[in-house]
Amino acid sequence: MAIDYHERIPNNVGISDNRALQRALEHWQPRFLDWWREMGPSAFRGADVYLRTATAVDDKGWASYGYVNMPEYRWGIFLADPVPDRRIGFGDALGEPVWQQVPGEHRSTLRRLIVTQGDTEPASVEQQRRLGLTCPSLYDLRNLFQVNVEEGRHLWAMVYLLHAYFGRDGREEAEELLERHSGDRDKPRILTTFNEPIEDWLSFFMFTYFTDRDGRFQLKGLAESAFDPLSRSCRFMLTEEAFHMFVGLSGITRLIKRTLEIMKALRSDDPAAVRNAGAIDLPTVQRYINFWFSSALDLFGAEISSNAATYFATGLKGRPDEARFEDHRAMGRLRLELPDGKGGVIQEEVTMRSAMNEVMRSLYVKDCDIGVQRWNRLIREAGWDFRLALPSPRFRRSVGAWAGVATDSDGNPISAETWHARQDDWLPAGQDRAFVASLMQRVTEPGRMASWIAPPEGGIDNLPAAYEYVRLN
Ligand code: BYC
Ligand code: FE
Ligand code: FE
């Protein structure tokens, strides 16, 4: 179905055929806009931003570009087209037709999954709200805002499902999605990572590289869901997520390129010298990787999880790209390495289904490593010995078997004293954050870049990098 932009809420799900649903969503819409004004991007209120808006949901030609004053962005409800005769692809109900309604017995579990997903979307906008004040270029500012409006739309996607399929409970949950706030003491966001402040652009690029990538994996799992409206929502969200991955990967890559230019000019990799020259030294980049990667790993849940086993068995949530797996019932077993509680490691074999979170996490770790290897190639080609690396998945965990177990960045258990003595080697310390903050100066002249980042290889929508992507007015 084509997207209808004449309606108050653009959509391709025919909400005007269901008056009660339309009214409920039109009631939520002004609350969303109030939230956006209060908790969304805090700078450049009157600016016109060169944004992409969805115009169709197929793979090709689904976007149009143009200047938008952000609160007037046309957020709406877009589902990917249905797959004819779609069947459940995994779990106990393998091969049965997918559901167009929520089965009563899965109602509360499914609602919880949708609420958890929905909660992350506005949370990320809240976390990023002050970054515009210190944008390194207009190009980057525009990309930040593009990510923000799309996360806003991802919230719409989950709110539609809550309103359309979960009755009164769903409407209440939709209200609460605007009442919890990132980092709020009384009403925080549900998952820990989404309560971490994002105060500088290095953190923003790390977040889009690592945290949005968790989003991609979770959305891929939910795109397999037997609940077809959820699957169709997530499939369309994934088309937008590709850009968020690009922002993270290209952002860190450009930052490293700039650092390598400075190191070449200085003929030195001395962090103090690199910092003096206005770039971010590679050991600092490594500490930010350690922080955001370990935080993102927690988002996959516990290594052994009966919740995860249930999601899989009942068809609520599959593995990313489920079709690529051989055994869609996942009847095998998996060997895990777990802490023994005495400073050592034990091997334990568990059912594959109960280890589903770990299966997803391992796929995610491999995907994260691809970018790290690309950055290392740049560093090697520039003639330096330094190498970036992902820390061990055991490192600094707050959820699951390794939660609270002190390890070094290679995952070897260490004493609490060693942890305290060495954590500043592994994680951004106050002075790292202060240094990075000192570089965050707003640059708004078209085509100019802040000192610490190289220009992009190209612009957006085939325009040059120096295009005026944001008109400040
Ligand atoms: N923080 O059985 P377990 C995105 C809780 S990102 C705090 O392993 P489960 C985006 C858990 O609730 C993708 N608590 O849990 C990115 C449980 O509590 P109870 C977001 C946590 O359910 C960037 C207990 O620990 N989407 O889209 O298997 C920008 C036991 O854990 C955390 C989803 O997450 C945590 N990190 O797994 C914008 C998909 N982790 O029941 C957007 C939907 C676990 O004991 N969510 N707990 O009180 C899920 O699939 C699952 O809820 C989780 C957790 C994988 C997150
Ligand atoms: Fe999202
Ligand atoms: Fe995203």
Image (cartoon, helix red, strand yellow):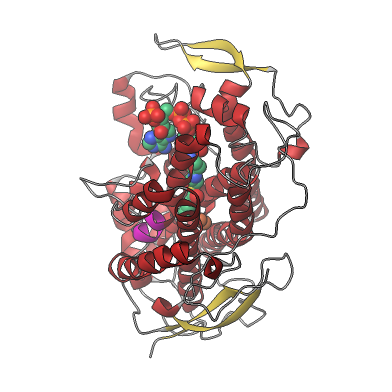
Looking at the image, residue 415 sits to the left or right of residue 96; the answer is left
Instruction: Let me know if residue 123 is in the magenta part.
Output: yes
Q: 347 or 163: nearer the eye?
A: 163
Which quarter shows the C terminus? bottom left
Q: Residue furthest bottom?
A: 473
Q: 45 or 297: nearer the eye?
A: 45
Looking at the image, residue 266 sits to the left or right of residue 176; the answer is right
Question: Which corner quadrant of the image does residue 59 belong to?
Answer: bottom right
Instruction: Let me know if residue 247 is in the magenta part.
Output: no
* Residue at 42%, 49% in the rendered image: 167
Residue 345 shows in this picture: yes
Residue 208 placement (x, y as % from top left): 50, 55
**Quick check: 303 above or below 87?**
above
Looking at the image, residue 243 sits to the left or right of residue 345; the answer is right
Which quarter shows the N terminus? bottom right
* Residue at 59%, 76% in the rendered image: 4
Q: Main secondary structure of the magenta part?
A: helix
Q: 98 or 230: nearer the eye?
A: 98
Residue 294 placement (x, y as % from top left): 45, 37
Q: 253 or 283: nearer the eye?
A: 253
Residue interval drawn in magenta = 122-127
Residue 148 placement (x, y as % from top left): 45, 65
Residue 67 placement (x, y as % from top left): 51, 85
**Quick check: 6 above or below 457?**
below
